[in-house]
Image (cartoon, grey):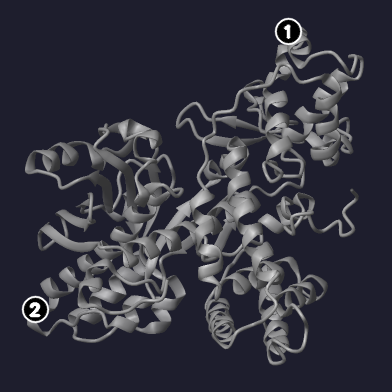
């Protein structure tokens, strides 16, 4: 059956040809399905307690601390080490060897022996080693200007300037949060069955959330050291403006390409959420209030979001203009349409930029938690996939025509269409992007050029009988095994592939990074180039040590 609406799959979701384009992925915004929101909802709804059993930080701000999340079945502890880092050693580069603070998320409550072991290794980061008792390893640097401003004002008994807070948004920014077996940490398969860690990146999100508490605690500590009894603590409204920054580079970009089943599940959950909302026949008063509240937050976020990057400056202008259009449209919502949410979405597709459309996406699902939150349970993936050698060549070619039509249409003889290549650096084993015409690393190219690989596979299949098996083909052409496996995955996972040429001259890796960071829940996306970005996490969220006061929070 031919789909009457090429923008929609027959199940009501948007088509992969619409969703899986870099320009749209690079306009993604966090939603209630973002991983930090999933983690917060579980922590706040469950029987979890939070405390700080260890605080051994001296008057220079050096020492160690422990923050615990104590649940009904398990306890997790962030072990934090604070350092006295000279200004000339502070760097966000992956090649840095020292940081203002280093962290490990420990499985359980650490003993003094555990803390001593971690103190000998965690500050070294990649140069040290941790154990399967640790779930993540991370580090962070101060935002020097804001750090000094906050301490100076608190020490004098004053609150810091909200404008200064808003201009930066965080006291510390992480430069890496490692998990899933890196440097000796626990493998993902060892913890994936735990309900609190089953969704993607839950250990990492918990680590960053507890790190946010540490950043506030240490500046208040240093303010008391300087100002004594007259020092102030951060007011709740000021604390709410602070998140945890993150500075990340190109190493994040290939993740979505290397994990096609996971990518499919993330995207499919989002698209199913939108499809569910669009089928609603009514807009209840509570949902309309929730929509308007989410719109107000989006406007506040856009107003204080700044960037110096030319591409992002243009996207911010689009976003702010589109928010004005959305605001005007909401004055008449829900109106008299039979399906008001679908009508609002269709209006957005016709009248908004990609930035505005993806913002509207987040707004539409925000007030519908009971309808969509269960989808988070399906965002993990068992990525084992057995290649089907019994498949016939004709069936494989049909998959290529259906799922990779975009790739088969590319002329890879054009140098601009394969101007770049992905490789792994020898020094840090981190992904890099080379220029094929000038760089000498092309022999190390990684198989991230899925479009070209699909085209090469299709060309190789041309002379093979359609009733021959894929196994027979691969015996003669084992070099295509990787792409055959991806094509078979894509046959049953429609959102598995980015439908753009990832080695083209005009490809922007920042689009891949923004998409992944939006799934994390990042805000204030601020590129410094097309390969390096700063963002903020957990702004506006509650603090774990404040929860014991019984304050209600919206998550």
- Which residue is at the front of the view, 201 or 174? 201
Q: Can you tell which quarter of the image residue 348 is in?
A: bottom right
Tell me if residue 317 comes above or below residue 380 in the rendering: below
Give the left or right position of residue 384, taking residue 407 as reference. Answer: left
Give the left or right position of residue 26, taking residue 127 as reference. Answer: right
- Tell me the residue at 63%/73% (across/down): 364
Residues tagged 2 and 1 counted as in contact (Cβ below 8 A): no
Q: Can you tell which quarter of the image residue 441 is in?
A: top right
- How far apart, in angstroms, are the residues tagged by discs 2 and 1? 76 Å
- Tell me the residue at 15%/81% (across/down): 231
Give the secondary structure at mark 2: helix
Image location (x, y in percent) of residue 37: 44, 63
- Is the residue marked by circle 1 packed among few (<14), some (14-19), or many (20+) residues within 10 Å? few
**Which residue is tagged 2?**
228
Instruction: Find residue 388 and name its label.
Output: none
Image location (x, y in percent) of residue 124: 27, 38
Tell me if residue 279 comes above or below residue 203 in the rendering: below
Image location (x, y in percent) of residue 332: 72, 91
Tell me if residue 485 comes above or below residue 348 in the rendering: above
Looking at the rendered image, the quarter that the C terminus falls into is bottom left
- Which residue is at the front of the view, 304 or 340? 340
N-term mark: 2 or 1: 2
Q: Is residue 185 visible?
A: yes
- Is the residue marked by circle 2 packed among few (<14), some (14-19), or many (20+) residues within 10 Å? some
Image location (x, y in percent) of residue 491: 73, 36
- Which residue is at the front of the view, 215 or 552? 552
Give the secondary structure at mark 1: helix
**Which residue is tagged 1?**
475
């Amino acid at each position: 059956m031919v789909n009457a609406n090429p923008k929609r799959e027959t199940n009501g979701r948007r088509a992969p040809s619409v969703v899986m384009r870099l320009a749209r992925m690079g306009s993604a915004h966090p939603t209630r399905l973002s991983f930090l929101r999933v983690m917060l909802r579980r922590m706040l709804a469950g029987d979890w307690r939070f405390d700080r059993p260890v605080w051994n930080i001296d008057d220079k701000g050096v020492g160690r601390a422990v923050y615990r999340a104590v649940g009904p079945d398990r306890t997790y502890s962030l072990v934090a080490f604070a350092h006295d880092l000279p200004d000339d050693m502070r760097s966000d580069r992956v090649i840095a060897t020292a940081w203002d603070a280093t962290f490990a998320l420990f499985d359980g409550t650490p003993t003094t022996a555990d803390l001593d072991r971690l103190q000998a290794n965690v500050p070294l980061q990649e140069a040290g080693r941790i154990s399967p008792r640790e779930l993540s390893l991370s580090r962070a640097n101060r935002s020097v200007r804001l750090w000094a401003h906050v301490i100076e004002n608190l020490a004098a008994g004053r609150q810091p300037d909200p404008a200064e807070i808003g201009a930066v948004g965080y006291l510390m920014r992480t430069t890496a949060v490692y998990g899933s077996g890196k440097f000796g940490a626990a493998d993902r398969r060892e913890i994936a069955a735990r309900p609190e860690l089953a969704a993607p990146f839950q250990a990492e999100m918990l680590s960053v959330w507890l790190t946010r508490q540490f950043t506030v605690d240490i500046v208040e500590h240093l303010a008391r050291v300087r100002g004594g009894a007259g020092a102030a603590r951060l007011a709740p409204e000021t604390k709410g403006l602070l998140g945890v920054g993150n500075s990340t580079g190109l190493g994040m970009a290939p993740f979505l390409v290397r994990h096609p089943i996971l990518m499919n599940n993330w995207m499919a959950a989002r698209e199913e959420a939108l499809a569910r909302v669009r089928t609603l026949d009514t807009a209840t008063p509570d949902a309309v209030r929730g929509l308007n509240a989410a719109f107000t937050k989006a406007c506040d976020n856009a107003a204080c979001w700044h960037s110096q990057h030319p591409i992002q400056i243009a996207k911010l202008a689009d976003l702010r203009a589109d928010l004005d259009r959305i605001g005007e449209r909401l004055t008449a919502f829900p109106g008299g349409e039979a399906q008001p949410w679908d009508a609002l979405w269709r209006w957005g597709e016709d009248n908004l930029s990609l930035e505005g459309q993806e913002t509207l996406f987040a707004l539409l699902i925000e007030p519908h938690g009971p309808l969509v939150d269960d989808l988070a349970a399906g965002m993990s993936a068992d990525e084992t996939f057995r290649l089907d050698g019994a498949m016939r060549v004709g069936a494989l070619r049909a998959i290529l025509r259906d799922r990779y039509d975009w790739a088969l249409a590319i002329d890879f003889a054009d140098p601009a269409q394969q101007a770049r290549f992905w490789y792994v650096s020898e020094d840090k084993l981190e992904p890099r992007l080379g220029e094929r015409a000038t760089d000498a690393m092309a022999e190390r190219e990684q198989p991230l050029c899925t479009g070209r690989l699909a085209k090469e596979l299709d060309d190789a299949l041309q002379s093979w009988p359609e009733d021959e098996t894929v196994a027979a083909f691969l015996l003669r052409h084992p070099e295509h095994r990787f792409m055959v496996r991806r094509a078979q995955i894509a046959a049953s996972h429609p959102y598995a592939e980015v439908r753009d040429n990832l080695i083209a001259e005009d490809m922007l890796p920042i689009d891949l990074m923004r998409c992944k960071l939006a799934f994390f829940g990042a805000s204030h996306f601020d590129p410094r180039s097309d390969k390096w970005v700063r963002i903020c996490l957990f702004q506006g969220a509650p603090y774990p040590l404040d929860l014991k006061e019984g304050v209600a929070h919206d998550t």
